[in-house]
Amino acid sequence: MEQTDALRAAVRDVADFPKPGILFKDITPILGDGILLRAAIDCFVADCAGQEIRKIVGIDARGFLFGATVADRLGIGFVPIRKRGKLPWRTESLAYKLEYGEAAMEVHTDAFEPGERVSLIDDLLATGGTAAAATKLIAKAGGNVVQAQFLIELGFLDGRAAFRPSPRNRSWSIESLCLEQCRKKFWHLLYTISATFSLAFPTIGSPCAKHTMSKFNERRTRNDSTRSVTFWQYLAGKI
């Protein structure tokens, strides 16, 4: 089994966490296995080759787990992007929109030399909103994002579309170790509707969502070669 296949197989889906209606992408089995953790870091490091990266940036909080280790391997610095109010010194801040409100992230003003080449690392690329905001914040603080790397990418959400080339570099790359695509468009649409309804009306909607989930999995089982992503994973990307 190739490294990426082993990593994909180790990601654990946890239903109804951290709230009902969400299937959480749990990466702790990877973190708890020395061989898999090393494989993930090896892949991140390999993707940095030839990029002349000078800083690794991790997004609060799971991006720290991989980013700091990659920086250590490369012998370069690590920069944390944190939620508002968590950094102790002077910061640059950027507010960005979420599906149900607004959030803000910060980075220290002295984190980057002007134009310093940066690789951004996080665990999950879903719709791309948080990571895209991070690239804008890095640019605001003087860094130059030339690459973004993710352990997991939910490809059907097309999170890459949220990214735009940096004004300094119009050919930067986006890499992911575990790409999950959704090919069952009809069942995905149906499940999206039922799962959304279950969040708004749990008593009525939850049985409907569970039934649709069962039918979805039946179709997926009949074709093991097709990797499908449900609306649960879409919602997991919002956390």
Image (cartoon, grey):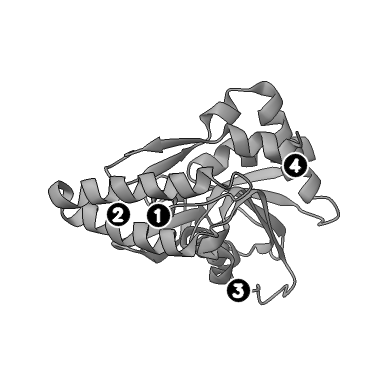
Residue at position x 75%, y 52% in the image: 54
Q: State the CA–CA distance, disc 4 to disc 1.
A: 28 Å
Q: Earlier in the sequence, mark 3 or mark 4?
A: 4
Q: Earlier in the sequence, mark 3 or mark 1?
A: 3
Q: In this view, does 23 lie to the left or right of 136?
A: left
Q: What residue type is labelled 1?
A: Phe
Q: State the CA–CA distance, disc 2 to disc 1.
A: 7 Å
Point out which mark residue 231 bears: 1
Q: State the CA–CA distance, disc 3 to disc 2.
A: 31 Å
The answer to which quarter of the image holds residue 8 is: top right
Question: What residue does disc 3 label?
Answer: 164
Question: What residue does disc 4 label?
Answer: 43
Q: Where is residue 115 in the image (x, y as percent from the top left)?
A: 71, 65
Q: Which amino acid does label 3 sit on?
A: Arg
The quarter of the picture where the N terminus appears is top right
Q: Nearer the viewer, mark 3 or mark 4?
A: 4
Q: State the CA–CA distance, disc 4 to disc 2.
A: 35 Å
Question: What residue does disc 2 label?
Answer: 195
Q: Which of marks 3 and 2 is nearer the N terminus?
A: 3
Badge 4 density bin: few <14, some 14–19, many ≥20, Cα 10 Å: some
Q: Where is residue 48 in the image (x, y as percent from the top left)?
A: 78, 50
